[in-house]
Amino acid sequence: QVQLVESGGGLVQAGGSLRLSCAASGSSFSINFMGWFRQAPGTRRELVASITSIGSAIYADSVKGRVTISMDNAKSTVYLEMNSLKPEDTAVYFCLVQTRDRVDPYWGQGTQVTVSS
């Protein structure tokens, strides 16, 4: 079993920055990839960015150039650096980890990001 603890959400003005963190812990797991999804009210959960254990990253078109995902393998922690935030980035951000020993990923509890105009 893997537990995820997210931090770093909050309220920021448009144009500002936030850094989200997500630490995975548990007994004997091997990470395939980690990532961040987000869900705004009335919308489907969507991928923001993901990164493999060897550092290969992908980004949603809506955040390219404004967001950087990184992972510290030693700490089993993924970071999401968000810059030039827009009101449309407002959502609950969920961390995800896909381990090598099972099909379904683990999800964090979510952290609220609110960008005011």
Image: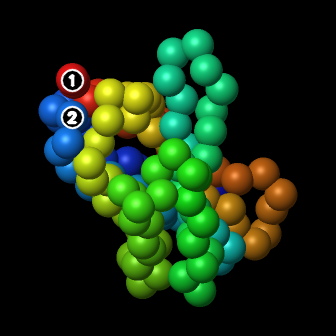
Q: Position of residue 111 (x, y in %)?
A: 37, 36
Residue 11 got which mark? Answer: none
Relative side of 12 to 99, left or right = left
Question: Quarter-wise, where is residue 68 in the image?
Answer: bottom left
Q: Which residue is mark 1?
A: 117
How many marks can you see? 2
Secondary-structure class at tag 1? loop
Q: Residue furthest top?
A: 42
**For the point 78% across and 69% down, which residue is it?**
101
Looking at the rendered structure, the secondary structure element under dot 2 is: loop
Q: Is residue 24 visible?
A: yes
In percent of width and height, residue 65 lies at 41, 61
Residue at the disc numbered 2:
14
Camera-nearest residue between 19 and 86:
86
Q: Residue at x 51, y 16 (%)?
A: 41
Up-down relation of residue 36 to residue 100 (above or below): above
Relative side of 66 to 50, left or right: left
Q: Residue at x 21, y 49 (%)?
A: 17
